[in-house]
């Protein structure tokens, strides 16, 4: 199954940071309807009429498709993304990240329509020294990563010819809590920060990822894609760039190791993604991460220096 015919697309996770951006980026000539696990709309995001639906409930999902159809494709962004909380809430994380994904993919298979499933760099263990390719074997080390991988497997089993799995990394955007927003707040409040410098990834803006997901739905084929902004950084480098671009002065920023900030869930030391398949599909990479960060700061009301 290749591409998607023009029509109405269902966006799950529409109240979230990514889903709300997807609703704002609907291509010309297309329609979108959003739903989420919760009924609240994203702060500053578009409203969505479908409200909250238990996506792990097959009957509820079938009704959703019937009520708002005909649906020609789905971008499934709904997920349990609280990485540390997942360590103690594995059953809930599995329901949201795996069971719901299987149900949504099965509904798409029944109708013969494509489904884009948003996944994560956390399906890898971080031991590889070079960027992870789409063909590298996943080996998650956290409950969050394990449940997202379970969702990938369930989606492929339910709809092998129609599911496009898109793994992304270090996501931030104009709505919701995110790393640069938190760092800038702390930098202004404290004036001195220590930030982890031994974890490496690719900071990725929803402003860049959202159009790419639409392209995968409209143009792509079944399989795995990696989608992150071009280049790589550590969390320290990410923080340093955010502070510099936002023009926040007189901040003492110190690098530290992961052991300085122990967390319930282990993090991969390297989760940089090689995005060759997506680049081939679109004819371009996502923007370099630092440039994308600058654009995000403009959209968020900051004035990059």
Image (cartoon, rainbow, N blue to C red):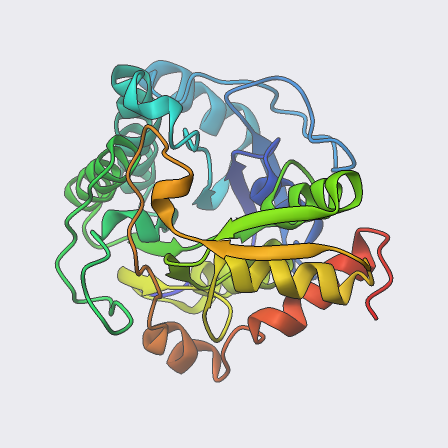
Q: Is residue 88 left or right of residue 47?
A: left
Q: Is residue 210 visible?
A: no
In this rendered view, identify the residue nearer to me: 122 or 147: 122
Q: Is residue 67 left or right of residue 192?
A: left
Asked if residue 95 is positioned above or below residue 261 in the image, the reply reads above
Image coordinates for residue 69, horizontal then vertical, percent: 52, 34
Image coordinates for residue 248, horizontal then vertical, percent: 81, 58
In this rendered view, identify the residue nearer to me: 291 or 60: 291
Image coordinates for residue 161, horizontal then vertical, percent: 21, 55
- Name the residue located 87 percent from the left edge and 62 percent from the top edge: 303
In this rendered view, identify the residue nearer to me: 302 or 69: 302
Split into 4 quadrants, where in the image is the C terminus? bottom right
Split into 4 quadrants, where in the image is the N terminus? bottom left
Asked if residue 159 is positioned above or below residue 236 in the image, the reply reads above
Q: Is residue 291 visible?
A: yes
Image coordinates for residue 276, horizontal then vertical, percent: 34, 78
């Amino acid at each position: 199954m290749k591409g998607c015919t023009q029509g109405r697309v269902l966006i799950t996770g529409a109240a979230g940071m990514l889903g709300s951006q997807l609703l704002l980026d609907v291509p010309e000539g297309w329609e979108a309807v959003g739903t989420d696990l919760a009924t609240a709309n994203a702060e500053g995001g578009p409203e969505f009429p479908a409200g909250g639906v238990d996506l792990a409930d097959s009957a509820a999902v079938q009704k959703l498709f019937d009520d708002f159809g005909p649906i020609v494709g789905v971008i499934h962004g709904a997920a349990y993304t609280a990485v540390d909380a997942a360590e103690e809430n594995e059953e809930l994380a599995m329901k949201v990240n795996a069971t719901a994904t299987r149900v949504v993919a099965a509904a798409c298979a029944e109708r013969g329509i494509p489904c884009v499933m948003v996944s994560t760099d956390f399906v890898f263990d971080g031991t590889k020294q070079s960027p992870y390719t789409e063909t590298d074997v996943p080996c998650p080390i956290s409950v969050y990563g394990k449940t997202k991988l379970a969702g990938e497997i369930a989606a492929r089993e339910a709809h092998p010819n129609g599911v496009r799995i898109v793994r992304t990394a270090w996501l931030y955007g104009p709505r919701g809590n995110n790393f640069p927003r938190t760092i800038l707040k702390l930098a202004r409040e404290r004036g001195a920060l220590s930030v982890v410098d031994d974890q490496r990834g690719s900071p990725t803006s929803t402003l860049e990822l959202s159009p790419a997901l639409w392209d995968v739905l409209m143009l792509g084929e079944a399989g795995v894609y990696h989608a992150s902004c071009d280049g790589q950084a550590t969390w320290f480098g990410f923080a340093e760039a955010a502070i510099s671009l936002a023009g926040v002065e007189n901040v003492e920023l110190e690098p530290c190791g992961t052991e300085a900030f122990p967390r319930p869930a282990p993090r991969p030391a390297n989760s940089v993604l090689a995005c060759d398949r997506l680049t081939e599909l679109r004819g371009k990479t996502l923007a370099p991460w630092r440039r994308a960060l600058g654009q995000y700061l403009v959209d968020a009301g900051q004035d990059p220096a």
